[in-house]
Amino acid sequence: MNKEQARREQDNEISSFLEHKAYNLRKWSIIQTSQAGSGHVTSCLSAADIIAVLFFYSMQYDAGDFNNPDNDRFVLSKGHAAPVLYAAWKEVGVLTEQDLLGYRTIGSTLEGHPTYRFQYAQAATGSLGMGLSIGVGIALCAKLDKRSCFTYVLMGDSETAEGSVWEAVSLAVYYKLDKLVGIIDCNRLGQSTETMLGCQAQKYSDIYTSFGFKTYIVDGHSIPDLMAVFDASGAALGSEQPIMVIAKTHKGYGIESVEDKEGFHGQAFKKENREAVLAQLKERFLDAAMYTEDRVSSQLLGHTASTLPDTIPAMSQKLKEYTAAIIIPSSFPYVYAKEAMIATRKAYGEALALLGDVLTEVVCLDAEVKNSTYAELFEKKHPDRFFQCFVAEQNMIGMGIGFSRWGKIPFISTFGSFFTRAHDQIRMAVLSNAALRLVGSHVGVSIGQDGPSQMALEDIGMMRALPNSIVLYPSDAVSTHSLVAQMAQYSAGVSYMRTTRSETPILYGANEEFPVGGCKVVRKSSQDKVCIIAAGITVWQALKAYDSLAMQEAPVYVAVIDLYSIKPFDRATVIATAHSAGNKIITVEDHYIQGGIGEMIAAALCDTGITVVSLAVTELPHSGKPEELLAWAHIDAQAIVTEVLSLLRR
């Protein structure tokens, strides 16, 4: 036998092995979904060959050390096809048949769509259109760390209609991510109708090529063709082009009754029909079903974990040891003169730049407003760790998930109002257990003449609603610096900081501490009649009101609390201060009343006998000077004085 014949025989043997794996993936997908009585089995059947080639031929990874940073990474963007992902890990050997039979049950980590509870998922997926953004973040992280690993993202053809996909496509090209490989499972059918492009694989190819991707069209059910395409994508290194593979497939492939037919999305085969369906599958793929795995030698599978370095780089150990206990030197706080006027948005940029000196894991992502958020101060000091995401906030959050997954500490900034368009990505970050640090500038009506489209007035409510989130709102530069450090140390969920556009005075000394969950009682006496609770810009209005009330002909004394930590908040201090101030509270905030501080305090104190009155924005705002708008919204010092006097007369 000559070398060419030997090579062909070897390729045929590997192909037979992969066809067997694809058969098993289909079998386990059918078993899981029929056992559960629900699930997207037809979407699994179309992708099984792709998954088989990736997991058992192309990808290099150590299944016993999933967090090894040199592993190739796989993101299942079409998260409804979760059963085929779980089946792959069963075939790898880290899950059991019993694990698969628990699919979609309340005690199982194998949920209907992957979440962080499944330890072998790169991120939670299922809300479509996010996987490529996450992949861009992972690939950028690998590039920053000079890793050789590839990132593979499997997408459904329906989800390519999502705008966030095209944000990710543009950024992947901009950052020349030639180790990012996207795969479109082009099976023609969506949930309720045919996709926009149907089976026009060439049109997909033309579109992605026009953006700057290197594209391949392949029969997604031909194992040899898939092997060749993924070999070619690996050989394309150095082209500085990301890869997009358009795999032509049939939804429901392997079971004639559902194959390439509408009306079967999300429908499992009935449990009582399972054996008959599995018999059809076996008959269709008889050779693959009868294959015995001991026929293939592990040496033939050249693209396996055996090609990883013998010694795992130091970063791997660092990644494993990464915890919330980040040590920040006591010298970190910035010293400001008492008379200084500093916008908290600028203090954020200064603090982040200093934090970058202390922690090399800190990265910064900004949505093309770095000169407004002051993220540019971080870029000037740490340009290699600053990532311009342009006006593409949804993709920016997805990228942040990818960075967080691999041990980075992402700070992500834009106008607070623009985080609303990425709320879906933010809530999916929560399901991914991703520790994102979000910083929203230009909040409230106090931004002034730019008008209502730029005013974040819903953000507190939006961020408070997220499980395990923290929400911070500093009133001066000193507290901003401390809270940036607190955010860096918080890894149990998403943290959000509001920053103010206007300059504000320095209120605190450099050594003041601002623990998450705390507050500052900045004014208090034994004669207090009312407790005013404010945060951010309204702290200064409350202090002006305090001075005005104290200078009344009959002085009125009030306590003033700076609620810099909105979630969690210091309920005990609030209650104690209110009890000593006539059991009366006035909250004042530059935010809509719905979902804001006032509603939060009223709900938390509903059983205490304390009266809570809320001053907040209650109408659609418009352009104007900041002081005019604060007065219009009845959240300025005069409005507070009026409300205090009114409350005392009741």
Image (cartoon, helix red, strand yellow):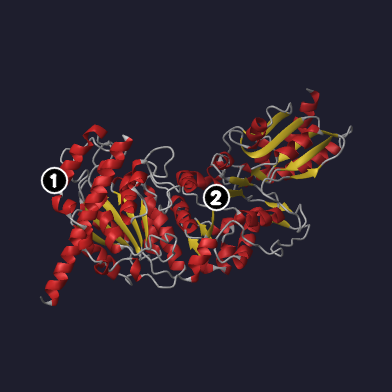
Image-based side of 640 in relation to 598, left or right: right
- Asked if one can make out residue 186 in the rendered structure from this viewpoint, the answer is no
Judge by depth and name the residue closer to the eye, 516 or 6.
Answer: 6
Of the residues shown, which amino acid type is indicated by label 2? Phe
Q: Which residue is the extreme one toward the right?
A: 553
Label 1: how many Cα within 10 Å (few below 14, some 14–19, many 20+): few
Residue found 75% across the figure and 37% down from its top: 532
Residue found 58% across the figure and 56% down from its top: 373
Of the residues shown, which amino acid type is indicated by label 1? Glu
Above or below, 61 against 21 in this view is below
Report the residue marked by disc 1: 283
Image-based side of 80 in relation to 610, left or right: left
Q: Which residue is the extreme one toward the left?
A: 1
Residue found 79% across the figure and 32% down from its top: 579
Which dot marks residue 163? Answer: none
Report the residue marked by disc 2: 415
Residue 613, picture quadrant: top right
